[in-house]
Image (cartoon, helix red, strand yellow):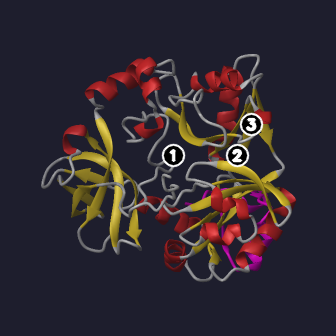
Amino acid sequence: MADTVAESDLKQTPLHDLHEELGARMVAFAGYSMPVQYKAGIMSEHLHTRSQAGLFDVSHMGQAILVGPDHETTARALEALTPSNFVELKLGRQRYTVLLNDEGGIIDDLMVTRSVSADDDGRLMLVVNAGRKDIDYAHFRTRLPDNVRLEIVEDRALIAVQGPEAVAAVAAHAPKAADLAFMSASSMEFDSIDCHIARAGYTGEDGVEMSVPAGAAEPIARALLADDRVEPIGLGARDSLRLEAGLCLYGHDIDETTSPVEGGITFCMQKRRREEGGFPAAERIQEELRDGPGRLRVGLRIEGKAPAREGAEIALPDGPVIGMITSGGFAPTVGAPIAMGYVPTEHSELGTQLELIVRNRRLPAVVTDMLFVPNQYYRKPKS
């Protein structure tokens, strides 16, 4: 979880002083000083998010904007680098995608939002992973056409509020947040502060991610934490929450050697793009969609209480090693150890019996759905 970077070289988010005031244990992560946990501990923070609402500082993530002369031009430029459909992305909607290298590997996974306002036509907002910002931005600059440019946003913070009470807590200050559907976004005021709020997140729970002026981040966080339903949550619980939701962590479950088909994230590829191609390594990815890849990311339930961490080997029962764990740990909501990793496709069927090698011991495990805990994303009832 933590990086080996000198403390003096670490960047700080606008909420750094508040983290220290709240008693957070700070660690180096993606070049930033970040809270890994608070006084209550990772288990308590995890369960509180599942039952009420957790506040996460994700200001280390990169925020940027693609700017072109009109929506179609900007969308086409982004489609040349990703396998997702942005031309048909509606106003006020958000989409998960992956930036691909020329071999079909994943440079990064990111969120893309089209403004709800037609006045912003030609602008697409991006949120990228903290540890990949410089790589992503350089890739965009060398691959974008001359009439589309990348603008890096330096003066904003990003706050996530997740859990069944998250939207209600935010809506007490920003009433329009309650009107958002899952993967939709809009500009609105939070206690008279202009913010951009998306109904999305990284925990499997309902919730929002809020792009706010850097100078307003602490007042907004304090206002939310004054609500008894909201507690501060660190990187430790963020990781266990996303693992239970079967969500990828870049650099662990997906990287530049992984295709979106191998990673099991083909939902980011809409029908038109699957059929037309027009993105890097389209032939490889279309072939994998048609014939299946050589390996697949799978979920694993482990017998007993001992967890298997990243790097543990996956083997056939009493047989050879066939894969490796990419994420693993104890799942507080499940009450058992779980993991994700890659195995040959012929061993990826649900119910397949495998073994995980941990400290020279073989632990029985079974391939299971990666959605270890059902997601609670909000979708408006159809009228």
Asked if the stretch drawn in magenta spans residue 246, the answer is no
- When the figure is inspected, residue 364 is found, relative to residue 347, above or below; the finding is below
Q: Look at mark 1 in the image and give the residue it sits on.
A: 251
Rendered-image quadrant of the N terminus: bottom right
Query: How busy is the neighbourhood of tag 1: few (under 14 within 10 Å), some, or many (20 plus)?
Result: some
Q: Closer to the camera: disc 1 or disc 3?
A: 3
Q: Look at mark 3 in the image and give the residue it sits on.
A: 65
Name the residue: 71% across, 42% down. Answer: 116
- Asked whether disc 1 touches disc 2, contact meaning CB atoms under 8 Å apart, the reply is no
Residue 165 or 150: which is nearer the viewer? Answer: 165
Q: Amino acid at mark 3?
A: Ile
Q: Position of residue 125 (x, y in %)?
A: 70, 39
Q: Closer to the camera: disc 1 or disc 2?
A: 2
Q: Look at mark 2 in the image and give the residue it sits on.
A: 62
Residue 7 or 105: which is nearer the viewer? Answer: 105
- When the figure is inspected, residue 206 is found, relative to residue 326, above or below; the finding is below
Q: Is residue 258 left or right of residue 102?
A: left
Q: How many marks?
A: 3
Q: Is residue 296 left or right of residue 365?
A: right
Label 2 secondary element: strand
Distance from Cα at disc 1 to Cα at disc 2:
16 Å
Label 3 secondary element: strand
Residue 286 or 235: which is nearer the viewer? Answer: 286
The magenta span reads 1-27
Residue that lies at the very extreme toward the left in this rendered image = 318
